[in-house]
Image: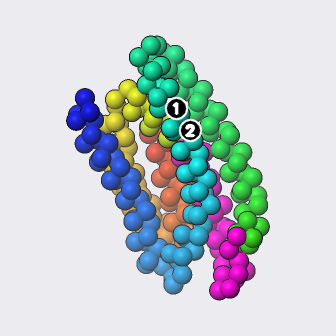
Amino acid sequence: MIYKQLPSKIGSGFLTGSTGFVNQFFAAQLAVGSIASFNYGMKIPSFLATVLVISIGNVILPYFSNLVQDNRQKAYRVLYQSITTVFFTSLTIAAFLFIFSETTITLLFERGNFTAQNTLVVSQIQKIILIYIPFYIATIIIIKFLTSINKNIHMFYASIINLVLNVILNYYFAKKYGIYGLAIATTLVYSINFIVLFV
């Protein structure tokens, strides 16, 4: 069973990990400083996502694994309840950071060569990126559930869709909106990924 699930898990991890490289590639085609602005815009959302993923993911996988063995119907009910709870909790946190985005960037980064103009650009990128946080965290819940029922192949297919979408959307939105387009594309990719895995 382990060997059967391993290729899907590795393939999914590889394709998902390539998202960052694709973003960096398109950011490098834009104005000087675009990569730095994008990276700064990702810092706080990435930190928030990591904290939530580690705290929720490590707890929920063994719980789902046990529940699936005992009562699969109940496991699906708990899955939907978990998705709803996590989605709206992370939405509230993301909304708070969205409102105070510029203030947060000013306090954390604005000094030396990081100017008020940089703060404005980075805070706008951060606002766009924060929109995907609830979708991303809810996706992690689904991924843990799929792992518990040994359906990692769905993650592999979703990752292929992600990669293709990421390239297409980055190309289109980067041309139209520059560095903000990359943030829009990233947010759309994670949101669509949630929908695909949920379905």
6 horizontally vs 138: left or right? left
Amino acid type at mark 2: Ile
Residue 20 on image: x %, y %:
43, 62
Amino acid type at mark 1: Ile
Q: Which residue is mark 2?
A: 56
37 horizontally vs 193: left or right? right
Quick check: marks 2 and 1 in contact, CB under 8 Å? yes
80 up-or-down from 130: above or below: above
Residue 105 on image: x %, y %:
70, 69
Q: Secondary structure at mark 1?
A: helix
190 up-or-down from 148: above or below: below
**Which residue lies at the image location 67% right of the left edge and 45% below the top edge?**
91
Q: Which residues are magenta?
A: 108-137
Q: Is residue 69 magenta?
A: no
Q: Which residue is mark 1?
A: 60
**Which residue lies at the image location 62% right of the left edge and 37% below the top edge?**
86
| Prevailing secondary structure class for the magenta stretch in the rendered image | helix
Q: Secondary structure at mark 2?
A: helix
Residue 98 on image: x %, y %:
71, 57
Residue 99 picture quarter? bottom right
**Which residue lies at the image location 73% right of the left edge and 65% below the top edge?**
104
The crowding category of the residue bearing disc 2, from other C-alpha atoms within 10 Å (few below 14, some 14 to 19, many at least 20), is: some
Residue 143 on image: x %, y %:
44, 37
Q: Is residue 132 magenta?
A: yes
Quarter of the image for the N terminus: give it: top left
Q: CA distance from mark 2 to mark 1?
A: 6 Å
Residue 188 image label: none
